[in-house]
């Protein structure tokens, strides 16, 4: 199956998106917000819908960091940001259309 790999997000040109065979942390994706990096696991994101959802999820973490919300909610507990991101992801993903520069990874 061919996957569309998004290389840049409009509004966040400083953000680097890496597509890696797998992540050391064993998750679908990770956001290293202070370095402007999102890493996506290609072995775990096996179809376009899952890849898009993971990218959206990690992008929400980055947006919270860039807008200062990560720091503001950090005193609510270790899982507070993840809970907020999951709530936003699950309620907004159906409204999102990815329209940005991409390349297709061939099988």
Image (cartoon, helix red, strand yellow):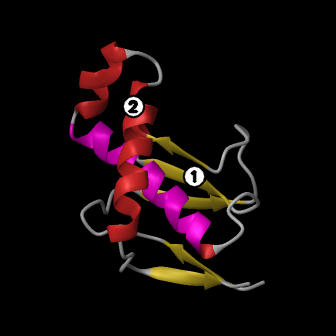
As helix, strand or loop, the secondary structure at mark 1 comes to strand
Question: Residue shown at 31%/30% (left/top)?
Answer: 70
Disc sitting over residue 64 in the figure: none
Q: Which mark is residue 81?
A: 2
Q: Quadrant of the C terminus?
A: bottom right
Name the foreground residue: 19 vs 43: 43
Q: Residue at x 60, y 64 (%)?
A: 50
**Which secondary structure lies at badge 2?**
helix
Circle 1 is placed at which residue position? 39
- Residue at x-position 37% and y-position 37%: 84
Residue 53: say if magenta.
yes
Above or below, 95 against 62 in this view is below
Number of residues whose C-alpha sits closer than 10 Å to that of mark 2, classed few (under 14), some (14–19) or many (20 or more): many
Q: Position of residue 64 (x, y in %)?
A: 30, 40
The percent position of residue 104, horizontal first and vertical second, equals 60, 84
Whether residue 21 sits left or right of residue 83 in the image: it is: right
Q: Position of residue 19 (x, y in %)?
A: 62, 62
Callout 1 touching callout 2 (CB < 8 Å): no
In the rendered view, does 1 fall on the left or right side of 84?
right
Region of the chain picked out in magenta, as a range = 49-67
Residues under labels 1 and 2: Cα distance?
A: 18 Å
- Quarter of the picture holding the N terminus: bottom right
Relative horizontal placement of residue 19, taking residue 89 as reference (left or right)? right
């Amino acid at each position: 199956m061919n996957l569309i790999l998004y290389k840049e997000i409009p509004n966040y040109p400083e953000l680097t998106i890496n597509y890696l065979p797998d992540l050391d942390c064993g998750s679908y994706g990770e956001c290293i917000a202070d370095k402007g990096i999102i890493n996506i696991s290609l072995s775990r994101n096996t179809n376009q819908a899952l890849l898009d959802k993971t990218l959206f999820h990690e992008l929400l973490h980055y947006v919270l960091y860039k807008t200062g919300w990560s720091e503001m909610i950090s005193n609510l507990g270790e899982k507070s940001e993840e809970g907020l991101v999951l709530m936003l992801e699950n309620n907004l993903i159906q409204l999102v259309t990815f329209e940005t520069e991409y390349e297709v990874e061939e099988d």
